[in-house]
Amino acid sequence: MTKTPTNQGKSWDSQESTLRSLARDNTPTGLIAYKLGYTSP
């Protein structure tokens, strides 16, 4: 069985502008998650 991430269910609302900017710049999804703090290095 897989482990549930500790950040599951967190809201992205406060970081929506950053997410949109990174997506517009064609940033890879792994790097976006790292920059927004949704994964550990």
Image (cartoon, helix red, strand yellow):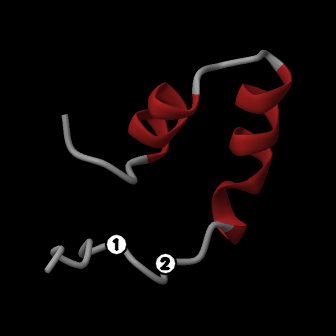
What is the secondary structure assignment of the residue under circle 1?
A: loop
Where is mark 2, residue-wise? 10
Q: Position of residue 18 (x, y in %)?
A: 70, 40
Residue at the spot 46% in from the left edge and 32% down from the top edge: 30
Would you identify the image quadrant in which residue 5 lies?
bottom left
Callout 2–callout 1 Cβ contact below 8 Å: yes
Residue at the spot 48% in from the left edge and 78% down from the top edge: 10
Q: Please, what is the three-letter code of the amino acid marked with disc 2?
A: Lys
13 displayed left or right of 5: right
12 displayed left or right of 10: right
What is the secondary structure assignment of the residue under circle 2?
A: loop
Q: Please, what is the three-letter code of the amino acid marked with disc 1?
A: Asn
Q: Nearer the viewer, residue 1 or 22?
A: 1
Residue 24, compared with residue 32, is above or below; it is above
Q: Position of residue 1 (x, y in %)?
A: 14, 80
Which mark is drawn over residue 38? none
Q: Position of residue 17 (x, y in %)?
A: 79, 46
The number of numbered discs placed on residues in the rendered structure image is 2
Residue at the spot 65% in from the left edge and 19% down from the top edge: 27
**Residue occupying the far front of the picture:** 1
12 displayed left or right of 36: right
Residue 5, compared with residue 25, is above or below; it is below
Which mark is drawn over residue 7? 1
